[in-house]
Amino acid sequence: MKFKLDKALSLVAVGVIGVLQGAHAAPVYEIKNIEDFDLNGTLESTRNGYGMAVNADNKSVGVSKGKKKLDTSEDDDGVIDIEDGIADAEKITYSIDEPIKANNFTFTSDENGASGAWIPTFDSVNGTTPPKDTDPDVPESINSVDVNYFDMNDAGVKIGSMTSPEQKVEYTGDTEGQDYWYYREFEERGFAKTASGSEIELLPPLTEYVKDSDTVNVGGYSVATAINATSLITGYAGTELSKTTKDKLDACISSDKYPIDVCVQDEQYPDTNGFTYFQYQVRAYLWQLGADDAVTESIELPLGLESTSDTVFSAQGLGVNAQGVVAGRSHVYRRDDKDKLAYDSAYWTKNGDGNYEYHWIPMIDDRFSSIAYDINDSGILVGSYQQYLEGYIRDKFFYFDTNNPDSEIVTPNDFYNTTSDLSSKAKDINNKGQVVGYIETTHDKEKPRPKEGFLFDKATSEFSNLNKLLTCESKGFVKNSDGNWVRNKIEVQDGTGVTLAYSSDIKVMEANSINEDGTIVGTAFIRKPLYKFDEDGNLVIGENGLPVFEVNGYGDPLTSYLPRMVVLQPDGAEADEAWLAANNCVDDNGDPEDYERKGAASFAWLFALPLLWFRRRFK
């Protein structure tokens, strides 16, 4: 059942309608990239994995982040790389004085993959090499290129963003022992990679800054976020530098402290809070790929307002359908009131002259920002808005019919017969009207709330927690001798010679993409034990040559959760009452509120973790 928040029904009416509403059984899902109660969800030697998109041929793209740091002391002969437990990720620093190390690695996974079904397979972009092949003693093996995949169409064209490789210039400063400064020609640029392996840069309109007789390479800024069947790509690009950035570039030109390229790089790096003062006017953008794997047309989409000032405004294209309608967001003066500037969901369509026009999706004043993530071929757009609910800022998933621009957005109910205060975001919609995303699952006011993936069926208004639709085996359960579902026990050998055991646990935390057959890719958390590290950050190795795990006062291993790509497919059954009764695999271990209290697992810190969302990358 769904209601518009603007036109709330009385509680009595809600109750009556809730009784009359028919029950709809959602499909049962099983996790397909699971083996021995572990997820094949990231590249070897990386810490985290994220599923980003899946096409009609059940081929998907993903991103691995955080090369694992498993250094031992010098007496223990180097590096041990095993998958039993959780290791720290290498810390990435941003400095012109140190070689650049990449932290994002792209992969594909395929239902009919050569290495097995849905196994993450490294996919090189712009010369990147597999993270497992990195050798600190071989500089050319160390990746300096960061890459993200965001989407892939049915022709196998993959799109995303990348950096350029590291460049270096002779150091002329006063620090002893330093030979070079390090920089990159650009920090983020959209690209497409075809099924045959051809790579195409999606250039922004601005890559240089000219001041008098000086021309400075700034690299420019572009990101490709979505691609349709005709290889029309949407995203966003920097069209002009901000005044503050121009002033900083003028200072680079006039200063002799650094070479200009190094000075530009230093300005582009983020500060300790992740903020960069190198800013662009950002606009939603389109690139059309032709049959010869070249960009045949680039289009800047109109901003939602007219500006003659130096104020920085932004717009982003985030989804595109078969008709070329683009969904995204843009700065706009709501109802032409310059006192009501908002960053709101929008869509762009072609007019009779073949030019794109901007369309605002109307929002009431209580909703102070919104975003549209995707649009299907029927013109149904999905997104979310922010609003105070019960005293706190929450995100709420909505959908909107672009064929009826005078209609209002619709906010589906989630797990109740009325609108709740649970934050939810939709990430993708297929042509059957099935929507996936994530939703909060508790109503805590003063602490972070856990998030889990959802599936919404527009045709039936059925809203389901994906973890409730999973087979018990997919959640880490097995049947015992009494025929009851219990959590599978995983044993690991400790460096002290003791065999440790912990309960398996897998939770789907975010669904990012769904194809027409209902295959879903996203991110799941999987429970793992924690390795023990000494005060110098070295992995502790026991006399038997195995790593030592952290344990609590009872000798049980301390565990935490890692994000991994997850692939879900319907198994042919329906989650009706009979199925739910037979698959009621729930225990206290599955209650997130119990994790820290028991001392067996640390889970709460992950609730606030922004999943790669990434998912589409915003700045």
Image (tube, helix red, strand yellow):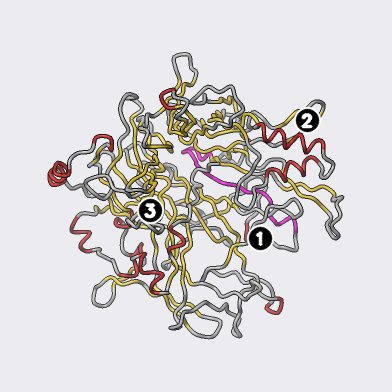
**In which quadrant of the rendered view does residue 359 lie?**
top left
Q: Which x, y percent locates residue 320?
A: 45, 32
The residue under label 1 is 133
Magenta highlight range: 139-157
Earlier residue among tags 3 and 1: 1
Image point (57%, 28%), residue name: 290
Q: Which x, y percent locates residue 319?
A: 46, 35
Quadrant (top left/top right/bottom left/bottom right) for the C terminus = top right
Secondary element type, mark 1: helix
Category of crowding for the residue at label 2, using alpha-carbon neighbours closer than 10 angstroms: few (below 14), some (14–19), many (at least 20): few
Given the current orientation, which residue lies at the most extreme top position? 353
Quadrant (top left/top right/bottom left/bottom right) for the N terminus = top left
Q: Nearer the viewer, residue 123 or 348?
A: 348
Question: Is mark 3 in CB contact (under 8 Å) with mark 2?
Answer: no
Image point (25%, 63%), residue name: 583
Does residue 2 appear to the left or right of 259 in the view shown?
Answer: left
Q: CA distance from mark 3 to mark 2?
A: 51 Å
Q: Is residue 324 above or below residue 125?
A: above
Category of crowding for the residue at label 3, using alpha-carbon neighbours closer than 10 angstroms: few (below 14), some (14–19), many (at least 20): many
Q: Nearer the viewer, residue 483 or 496?
A: 496
Image point (22%, 49%), residue name: 25
Q: Is residue 502 above or below residue 277?
A: below
* Disc number lying in front (3 or 2): 2
Which amino acid, mark 2? Answer: Thr
Q: CA distance from mark 2 to mark 1?
A: 38 Å
Q: Which x, y percent locates residue 460?
A: 23, 41
